[in-house]
Amino acid sequence: QVELVESGGGTVQAGESLRLPCAASGLTFSDYGMAWFRQAPGADREFVSSISWTGGAKFNARSLNGRATISRDDAKNTVYLQLDSLKPEDTATYLCAAEYRGSGRSGASSYQYWGQGTQVTVSS
């Protein structure tokens, strides 16, 4: 059974940083492209960042203006999202997703497995 478990969320002040890990189990992690999406109440799911299954390609949403950094540690079956200079509009549930042999696509429908998400709240 595949499981993706996000953690590291919480309430922070504007301008602070967070690092969100997503631990995977039940799959051969090194065979999967990974991505982070976010969803605020009443809004559509939004692409944040992705990394290909080889780790050779990374993509970020333009809307974050370089404030998001994705990385992976295949030895730990974990993908990370570093969020810097957080703003109140970054408040959302952050979810990780996995695509077999994924190249790091930004469309949510490309991903076969999803975690439950971790809440990030940024206060002004």
Image (tube, helix red, strand yellow):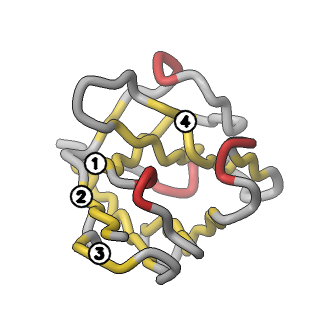
Give the x, y percent position of residue 113.
34, 34
**Residue at mark 3 to residue at mark 2: CA–CA distance:** 7 Å
Asked if labels 3 and 4 touch by Cβ distance under 8 angstroms, the answer is no
Q: Secondary structure at mark 1?
A: strand
SS at circle 4: strand
* Residue 52 locus on image (x, y percent): 69, 47
Other residues around mark 1 within 10 Å, as few (<14) / some (14–19) / many (≥20): some
Of the numbered discs 4 and 2, the one sitting upstream in the chain is: 4
Residue holding disc 2: 118
Q: Which residue bears the numbered disc 3?
A: 8
Q: Are marks 3 and 2 in contact (CB under 8 Å)?
A: yes
Residue 87 vs residue 53, the one in the foreground: 87
Residue occupied by mark 1: 93
Q: Earlier in the sequence, mark 1 or mark 4?
A: 4
Tell which circle, 4 or 3, labels the residue nearer the N-terminal end.
Answer: 3
User: How far apart are the alpha carbons under marks 1 and 4?
Assistant: 12 Å
Residue at which label 4 appears: 47
Three-letter amino acid code of the residue under disc 3: Gly
Q: Is residue 62 left or right of residue 86?
A: right
Distance between mark 1 and mark 3 Cα atoms: 11 Å
Camera-side residue of 13 and 39: 13
> Looking at the picture, does residue 96 appear above or below residue 46?
below
Q: Amino acid at mark 4?
A: Phe
**Is the residue under label 2 in contact with that under label 1 (CB below 8 Å)?**
yes
Relative to 84, is 57 on the left or the right? right
User: What kind of element bears circle 2?
Assistant: strand
- Under mark 2, the amino acid is Thr
Q: Residue at x 49, y 81 (%)?
A: 17
| Vertical relation: 81 (above or below) 33 | below
Question: Which residue is at the far front?
Answer: 124
Q: Looking at the picture, how far across and down is residue 39, in whole percent?
A: 34, 37
Residue 71: image tag: none
